[in-house]
Image: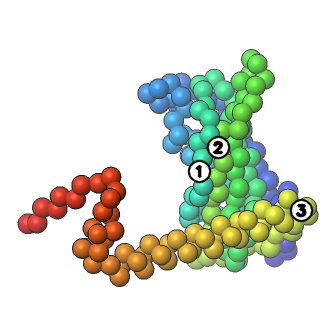
């Protein structure tokens, strides 16, 4: 399995935002945008790995600007990092108003995908050839994101397991919650 460049799997999908995508305020629903992000992440990961891929996590989703019905939304995806079977895909979403040519950066996020063999087991993905300083920086940043996500998950699972209900409730003092547990 030979290494691939970032450009080998770079993917851009553009879609017209139609009225059925609107939420109650008339803006494009965030779930619609997340679904499109998942689609472009899949295409990018599948192109790199040459295999079926599934989403493991989504990090850093930012809804910076609302998207309007009638705008063209372009989702740009590139492989930022590869592990053994995992790939972190960076996604940038921009919208374009066709009549005015105005563009805006609306969303950014990172999808972690894994590649699977025909039998559903994890498979090794090609190494990533880094051809620019931007590629190197993105790989480094995505590697750190993976490490931080692992730290957070370990902290949440370890600390909650090790705490009693009273300790957890005590940790919530001076927060904006009211605890009213009704015992059976």
The answer to which image quadrant residue 94 occupies is: top right
Residue for point 59% across, 42% down: 63
- Residue at numbered disc 1: 61
Residue for point 55% across, 75% down: 151
- Residue at numbered disc 3: 133
* Residue 146 coordinates in the image, percent (x, y): 64, 70
Badge 2, how many Cα within 10 Å: few under 14, some, many 20+?
Answer: many
Q: Are marks 2 and 1 in contact (CB under 8 Å)?
A: yes
The answer to which image quadrant residue 115 occupies is: bottom right
- Residue at numbered disc 2: 107
Q: Is residue 91 above or below residue 27?
A: below
C-alpha distance separating marks 2 and 1:
7 Å
Residue for point 63% across, 58% down: 111
- Secondary structure beneath dot 1 equals strand
Instruction: Return the residue nearer the eye: 125 or 120.
Output: 125
* Residue 88 coordinates in the image, percent (x, y): 68, 63
Residue at far left of view: 184
Residue at far bottom of view: 162
The quadrant of the rendering that contains the C terminus is bottom left
Badge 1, how many Cα within 10 Å: few under 14, some, many 20+?
Answer: few
* Mark sitting on residue 122: none
Q: Is residue 162 left or right of residue 140?
A: left
The quadrant of the rendering that contains the N terminus is bottom right
Q: Is residue 36 above or below residue 184?
A: above
C-alpha distance separating marks 3 and 1:
24 Å
Q: Sequence-wise, which precedes: disc 3 or disc 2?
A: 2
Badge 3, how many Cα within 10 Å: few under 14, some, many 20+?
Answer: few
């Amino acid at each position: 399995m030979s290494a691939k460049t970032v450009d080998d799997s770079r993917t851009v999908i553009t879609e017209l935002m139609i009225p059925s995508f609107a939420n109650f305020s008339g803006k494009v629903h965030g779930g619609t945008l997340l679904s499109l992000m998942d689609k472009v992440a899949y295409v990018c990961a599948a192109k790199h790995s040459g295999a079926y891929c599934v989403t493991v996590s989504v990090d850093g989703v930012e809804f910076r600007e609302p998207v309007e019905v009638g705008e063209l939304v372009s989702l740009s995806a590139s492989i930022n990092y590869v592990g053994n079977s995992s790939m972190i895909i960076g996604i940038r979403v921009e919208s374009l108003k066709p009549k005015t040519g105005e563009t805006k950066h609306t969303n950014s996020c990172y999808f972690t995908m894994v590649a699977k063999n025909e039998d559903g087991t994890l498979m090794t993905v090609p190494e990533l050839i880094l051809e620019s300083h931007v590629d190197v920086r993105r790989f480094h940043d995505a590697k750190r994101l993976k490490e931080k996500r692992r730290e957070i998950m370990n902290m949440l699972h370890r600390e909650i397991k090790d705490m009693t209900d009273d300790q957890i409730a005590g940790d919530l003092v001076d927060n904006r919650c009211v605890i009213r547990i009704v015992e059976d």
